[in-house]
Image (tube, rainbow, N blue to C red):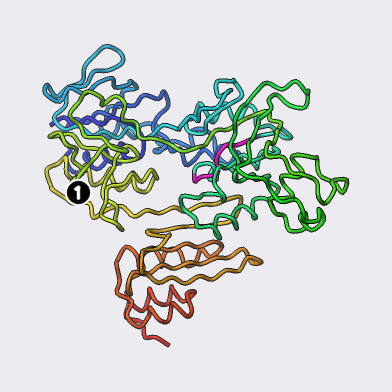
Amino acid sequence: MHHVIIGAGPAGVVAAETLRKADPSAKITILGKEKEPPYSRMAIPYKLKGKIEEEGMYLRHDTEHFKALDIDIRQVNVDKINSDSKTVDLSDGSQQGYDKLLIATGATPLTPPVKGMELPGVHKSWTMDDMRGIESLATKGAKVVQIGAGFIACTNMEGIVARGVELTIVEMEDRMVPRMMDEIAGNMIKDWCIDQGVNVLTNGMVTSIEESSNGASRYQVTVKQKGAVAAAEPVAEAKESGGILSAIKDALFGGGSAVPETAPVSDEVKLDADLVIVATGVRANTGFLEGTDIAVDQGILINENMETSVADIYAAGDCAQGKDFSTGQQEVHAIQPVAVEHGRFAAQNMLGRSVENPGSLNMNVLDAVGLISCSYGLWMGVEGGDSVKVVEKDMWRYLNLQFDGDVLVGSTAIGTAQHMGAMRGLIQMRVNLGEWKSILMEEPTRVMEAYLALTQSTVIK
């Protein structure tokens, strides 16, 4: 049996290792297009901070790991899948045959339609080559503009800030990480970042990146604000609050008490930049599947057994659109824990064991310049469901629990890491809370007690 895996990321590597453990005699080939050994993109912030060397980013640190497992890794791109002949066309002109095929091609960063994206100082933050480009320009004192404040952007932010740069983040939505945090949480993270010295412009869209002629920086980035910002608030008060008004005024007028209290705030901001980082989301790598019978929507459609619409072809990771644990609908969850989970399930099914994936939980855990936050499941709530919130802005803490009947279905937490495991456990186990529902509605911070009581028969006190 020859298992071929397209993609050398976490999903592909875990699938290969799972296959090898179960079948010592199988032939296993990984096809990966990048020149480096398999590595984790989630390690980029640690490399930017200088905590690890490039080798520390590798998924397996033993240089002989894959050789010892008799897993062949070929650094070549796949141009086409021929399901009738069970072969794939490779970029070096050769073909690779397979018995079972796993597509784990991951995702590609989106490129917004903005003038100047091709300039040499504009980098995405996805590959090791991207990281090297960022490292070369994100030197102490450099002016850096990052487009986007989603999960990837905020994950990499700490590494960038640690390099001593002047960082400005531009986000189109009204808050940071809008796809994983509600308005309270997203704005709390924004205020925290501003408090840490990061300039954050929400409700802003970058319209152009041009070479600068003012001598202050390499580029000038034009940001269009979605709406005029009221400027009636006194400058001193705005600065004390650390709010967005202060950040915008500083960007426009250079800060200081010389700014009049009623100065008009332009809906266009010019930002100096030596480096521009683009982090505006990703899309599944499925373009090479055009012309095949493999069904694709937002990603490659798969069933509970990780099978695509074509026999003996499976998909896993960021490129796969599989069952969502909370809704039962097919969703793309482009996060590493899901990729690892997918890889294991796919391998089991490639071995013919028919192991169904119950669905992947939408989950995000984020460290935004030292502020830990998470969101799980249906964090935005369900129609007709109950919810409870605890907001302690002065303490940088927030807890939001979402219920469907007496089942916890979603949660958000900031600055309260001790609750994270309990919330995830209750959601994934679909525990009927019973009398604990009313207790949590009154005292949501007792979620750990609820978890222990309901899973380990602890008596309520």
Residue 191 coordinates in the image, percent (x, y): 65, 55
Residue 6 coordinates in the image, percent (x, y): 28, 29
* Residue found 60% across the figure and 58% down from its top: 188
Height in image: 240 above or below 162? below
Q: Quadrant of residue 233?
A: bottom right
Tell me: 298 left or right of 213: left
For the view shown, which residue lies furthest in the bottom direction?
461
Residue 392 coordinates in the image, percent (x, y): 61, 69
Height in image: 450 above or below 17? below
Q: Quadrant of residue 63?
A: top left
* Residue found 58% across the figure and 65% down from its top: 397
Height in image: 18 above or below 427? above
Q: Does the magenta stretch include residue 150?
A: yes
Quadrant where the image shows the N terminus: top left
Amino acid under disc 1? Glu
Front residue (pair 106, 282): 282
For the view shown, which residue lies furthest in the top direction?
93
Q: Does the magenta stretch include residue 373?
A: no
> Label 1 neighbourhood size at 10 Å, few (<14), some (14-19), many (20+)?
some
* Residue found 40% across the figure and 38% down from its top: 59
Quadrant where the image shows the C terminus: bottom left
Magenta range is 145-151
Question: Which residue corresponds to mark 1?
Answer: 304
* Residue found 31% across the figure and 16% down from its top: 91
Q: Number of numbered discs present?
A: 1
